[in-house]
Amino acid sequence: MYASARKKRSDNGSESARPYEPEKNPAVRRLTAGAIKRRKAKTAFPIATAYDAPFAQFVEDAGIDVVLVGDSVGNVVLGYEETTPVTVDDIVYHTKAVARGTSRAHIIADMPFGSYQVSNEEALRSAIRFVKEGGACSVKLEGGVHEADRVRAIARAGIPVVGHIGVTPQTAGLGPGFKMRTHRERLIEDARAIEEAGAYAIVLEVVDHEVSREITALLTIPTIGIGSGPHCDAQVLVLHDLLGMYPHSPPFAKRYAEVGRLATEALGAFARDVRERTFP
Ligand code: KIV
């Protein structure tokens, strides 16, 4: 397999003779939710999404030790316009790939639309699949006060949960869309409800920066910002946005590379070489 093949090769391409290591439970070596929770109010930490083994390995190799298998997989990998069509099976499949491509990173599986709304039982059943089949270390779900019961049910079963408030893309079409959320009291109430329900961290998506600062100061769990300013305990970006895989990315997402353009150029060079018989 690609990822493990990369790991086993030394710089000169030969198989490295590694000292004997007893078999370990891989889950034990991964960063725990407790360790992430203890990062509250310390150095800000990065989180990136990943959906397959090689890119998950790039993320881990870059020193990013928290990987989110976001339901953004629907938009950036599966070709949907929205995240709502993403299924539990999709997230299990992509979480497995991310688990194979990493060894130490904490993997958060995003609970897709329809996998937790109906009942606590169904939410727990879905969360268990992400952990048992996918190899996730924790799960994330969208919603504030109204989803606090779901967070509580999953956390009580021993599965660490990340909350997600502000812009919640699964239901953005029902409310004010993707506009910045500024309703201070409602946001604080949502954040408190999610913390009180037992979440170990919370995503603040496109939340007014001053409200984000206030929530970060009020909560005892880390806040993970996306488009919510510099005051959060962590920052998360969608991999395809930060690598510049598509021509457009959200205004808050810094493009650290232009991988989409590079890929098209490389493929164009290959196509030219084949047509001109200069390769092979
Ligand atoms: O699905 C996702 O990638 C997310 C992040 C944008 C936080 O939920």
Image: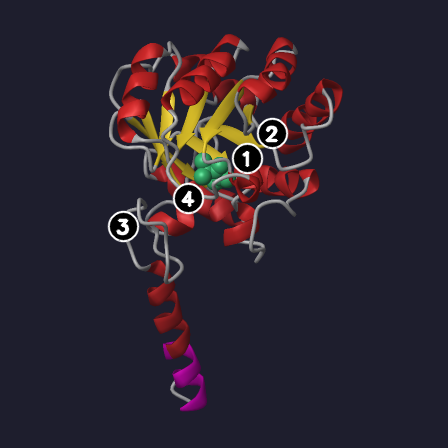
Is label 2 or label 3 in front? 3
Q: Label 4: how many residues lie within 10 Å, few (<14), some (14-19) or many (20+)?
A: many
Give the spatial CA distance, label 2 vs label 3: 29 Å
Compared with 29, 259 (above or below) is below
Using the image as rendered, state which of residue 92 and residue 111 is in the foreground: 111
User: Residue type at mark 4?
Assistant: Val
What residue is shown with label 3? 256
What residue is shown with label 4? 238
| Quadrant of residue 38 within the rendered picture | top left
Q: In this picture, which residue range is highlighted in magenta? A: 269-276
Helix, strand or loop at label 2? It is loop
User: Residue type at mark 3?
Assistant: Tyr
Side (left or right) of 129 relative to 75: right
Q: Mark 4 and mark 1 in contact (Cβ < 8 Å)?
A: no
Q: Mark 2 and mark 1 in contact (Cβ < 8 Å)?
A: yes
What residue is shown with label 1? 99
Give coordinates of residue 260: x percent, y percent.
38, 62
What residue is shown with label 2? 135
